């Protein structure tokens, strides 16, 4: 696990967000949220380990990771509900590392919503304005309740609303203060799947509408990718990789990211040669190539990674679409027909089972269990990861 | 459901079936009856013309109600009990609430020991509490001053654990994130306390206060040992029962019962009105 952190940490943390390079940005005014070498140690473990993070103003930023990876602790330090053991947190020019929670322009949507049960919806939403003695509370609250489509529920108590409505109240209660950063701690975790999909779109719409910085903590990779424009994948207190969802998905830098975001086939290989734009790898006797830009190891060995939907399946000797890496000798061991696609497990000559997702376009027949097939993929889709990393790190299902 | 039953169990005798289906209801009613019979007797006896035999109903009269304080010493004792009850409730509720906050919210050395020790007065037999308090007062040189204040100190002491336990459970059941949310929404620690914490814990504090009053008003053993020459209502009743309790004691009992029912009803009506107003 520690190799994963060492391998990925320094390579990915700075410089992934455009313009956030610490060297280049020095001197220039930076108006986003910035964490520098933030560490949080509890009595028995280190929740957040020397974390650097830049969240540009106005972005929808997701902190994605499994439970216990330190993402919620990071959020709570930004909110002021925890104080870092060391490091600094700044918001624009302002150092908020030690500021009290009620003295920072940051508001939180709590996982449990934390609506005040003794106050009605109106007073819940008005709470922040009233504490700061703002004028025109009535108009603002009405406006905000309209934004979340709860105008008619103003005089109800939280317990009388459904989960989805409570979630929207929690959002309205935080948003009305127009914080510089809005923190969302797994805000959709308690909702059922259908409602969650709806709220994801809703949240994205509201963020675009109000233009505030959203930092969203979640363990749901689909949620992070749907909503955020930048995703930071966090594991064991450090950021594994950060970037746009498509970039993270298509070009993961560590086995953890490859497995945690979607699924990956990881096959052990040894590096044969490196040229300017291609790395050639021997994979159990078969030569495959990986673009240099997608090669994330300097060693002699590595994990050749390929997403299941990038793998093509065909009869032995068939001319598959790829002027690429062809691997013969597979046997289909499992077929799951899921409608839009068919998911195969194919046992390779070296004993490993690879996952293949084939779109049901109708251009190709379905294969059945026991059939001999060959697999192929375009070299530009493959990636090469550090052999020292655990091939099953971050796997949520029995993939990879 | 009920329409389908007779067809399925048509062979059973109707009465037996009715009893089977309403067994819980019947048992519940019997338990309620068992609980309320003594109270009914007290109410009934308060209207008893009982100069000769105080334990049997003679004839109906309103005399007891008209002349409650016929025996002035009973009303004096009642007044002492009420004053002690109110003061002990205030003292115990204040101290106990503070202690409960400390025990739930703050991590300090000896917290688990304190949590355990706070139970002891509840677990210890009253006679032990009473006699050891008496020993303490005498040892401290207050043997001449036993009376109102020593009773009050004793009552605060044994009410305290009940307050701590009640308020503590309410506090422990409260979601931490509510106070964090208040702070996140610009409430200072003081505002958080007054606007969020206290309103949410208040039902627990109120319950603890009512419990304290009834414990204090009711207490005989500890009080008797530390009362000196002071006379509380339970002590008066105890003393009077040696010769025959005056009928007015039943009047006081009835009033206390009606008052406590009224408190419960007012609370119930209040919460119903609130929820009705909400659903409109």
Image (cartoon, rainbow, N blue to C red):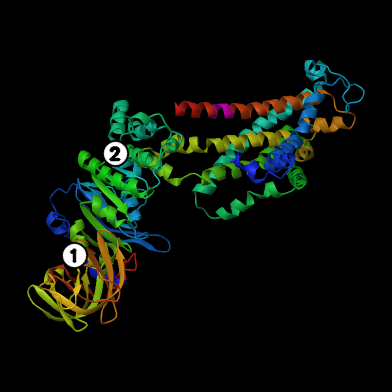
Q: Is residue B232 visible?
A: no
Q: Which percent across, then down, holds residue A334? A: 31, 71
Q: Which residue is mark 2?
A: A175
Q: Residues within 10 Å of mark 2 (few under 14, many from 20)?
A: many
Q: Which callout, 1 or 2, points at the residue further toward the start of the chain?
A: 2
Q: Residue at x 29, y 57 (%)?
A: A221
Evaluate whether label 1 is on the same chain as label 2: yes
Q: Which residue is mark 1?
A: A251
Q: Is residue A344 above or below residue B62?
A: below
- Report the magenta residues as a range: B267-271
Q: Which percent across, then down, holds residue B13? A: 74, 42
Subunit that carries the residue with mark 2: A
Looking at this view, name the residue that lies furthest to the bottom: A285
Q: Which percent across, then down, holds residue A17? A: 17, 56
Q: Residues within 10 Å of mark 1 (few under 14, many from 20)?
A: many
- Label 2 element class: helix
The answer to if B270 sits in the magenta stretch is yes
Q: Residue at x 34, y 35 (%)?
A: A128
Q: Quadrant of residue A180?
A: top left
Q: Quadrant of residue B80?
A: top right
Q: Is residue A283 visible?
A: yes
């Amino acid at each position: 696990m520690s190799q994963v952190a060492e391998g990925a940490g320094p390579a990915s943390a700075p410089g992934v967000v455009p313009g956030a390079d610490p060297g280049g940005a020095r001197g220039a005014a930076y108006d986003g949220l910035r964490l520098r070498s933030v560490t949080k140690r509890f009595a028995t473990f280190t929740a957040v380990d020397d974390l650097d993070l830049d969240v540009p103003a106005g972005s929808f930023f997701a902190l994605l990771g499994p439970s216990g990876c330190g993402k919620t602790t990071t959020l709570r330090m930004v909110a002021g509900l925890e104080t870092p053991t060391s490091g600094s947190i700044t918001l624009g020019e302002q150092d908020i590392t030690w500021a009290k929670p009620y003295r920072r322009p940051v508001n939180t949507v709590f996982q449990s919503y934390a609506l005040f049960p003794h106050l009605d919806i109106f007073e819940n939403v008005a709470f922040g304005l009233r504490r700061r003695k703002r004028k025109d509370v009535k108009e603002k609250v009405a406006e905000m309740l309209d934004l979340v489509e709860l105008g008619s529920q103003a005089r109800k108590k939280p317990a009388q609303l459904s989960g989805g409505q409570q979630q929207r109240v929690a959002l309205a209660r935080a948003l009305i203060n127009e914080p510089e950063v809005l923190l969302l701690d797994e805000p959709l975790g308690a909702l059922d799947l259908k409602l969650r999909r709806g709220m994801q779109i809703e949240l994205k719409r509201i963020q675009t509408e109000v233009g505030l910085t959203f930092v969203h903590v979640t363990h749901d990779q689909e949620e992070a990718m749907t909503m955020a424009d930048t995703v930071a994948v966090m594991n064991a207190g450090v950021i594994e990789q950060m970037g746009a969802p498509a970039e993270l998905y298509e070009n993961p830098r560590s086995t953890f990211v490859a497995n945690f975001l979607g699924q990956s086939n990881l096959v052990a290989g040894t590096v044969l040669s490196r040229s300017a734009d291609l790395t050639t790898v021997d994979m159990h006797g078969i030569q495959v190539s990986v673009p240099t830009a997608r090669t994330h190891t300097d060693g002699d060995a590595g994990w050749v990674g390929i997403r299941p939907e990038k793998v093509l399946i065909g009869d032995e000797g068939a001319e598959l679409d790829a002027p690429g890496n062809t691997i013969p000798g597979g046997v289909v061991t499992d077929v799951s027909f899921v409608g839009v696609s068919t998911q195969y497990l194919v046992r390779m000559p070296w004993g490993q089972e690879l996952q293949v997702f084939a779109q049901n376009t109708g251009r190709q027949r379905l294969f059945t269990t026991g059939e001999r097939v060959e697999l192929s993929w375009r070299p530009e889709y493959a990636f090469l990861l550090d052999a020292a990393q655990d091939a099953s790190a971050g796997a949520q299902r029995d993939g990879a | 459901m009920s329409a389908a039953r007779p067809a399925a169990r048509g062979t059973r005798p109707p009465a037996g079936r009715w009893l089977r289906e309403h067994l819980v209801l019947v048992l519940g009613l019997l338990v309620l009856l068992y609980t309320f019979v003594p109270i009914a007797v007290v109410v009934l006896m308060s209207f008893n013309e009982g100069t000769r035999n105080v334990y049997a109903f003679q004839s109906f009269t309103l005399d007891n109600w008209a002349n409650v304080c016929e025996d002035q010493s009973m009303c004096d004792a009642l007044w002492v009990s009420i004053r002690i009850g109110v003061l002990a409730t205030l003292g115990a509720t204040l101290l106990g609430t503070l202690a409960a906050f400390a025990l739930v919210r703050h991590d300090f050395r000896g917290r688990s020991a304190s949590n355990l020790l706070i139970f002891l007065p509840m677990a210890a037999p009253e006679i032990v509490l009473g006699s050891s308090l008496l020993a303490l007062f005498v040892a401290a040189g207050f043997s001449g001053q036993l009376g109102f204040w020593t009773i009050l100190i004793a009552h605060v002491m044994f009410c305290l654990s009940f307050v701590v336990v009640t308020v503590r459970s309410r506090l422990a059941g409260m979601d931490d994130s509510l106070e964090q949310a208040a702070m996140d929404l610009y409430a200072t620690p003081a505002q958080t306390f007054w606007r969020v914490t206290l309103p949410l814990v208040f039902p627990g504090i109120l319950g603890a206060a009512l419990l304290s009053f009834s414990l204090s008003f009711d207490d005989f053993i500890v009080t008797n040992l530390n009362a000196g020459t002071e006379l509380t209502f339970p002590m008066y009743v105890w003393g009077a029962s040696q010769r025959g309790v005056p009928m007015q004691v039943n009047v006081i009992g009835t009033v206390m019962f009606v008052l406590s029912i009224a408190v419960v009803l007012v609370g119930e009506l209040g919460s119903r009105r609130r929820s009705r107003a909400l659903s409109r």
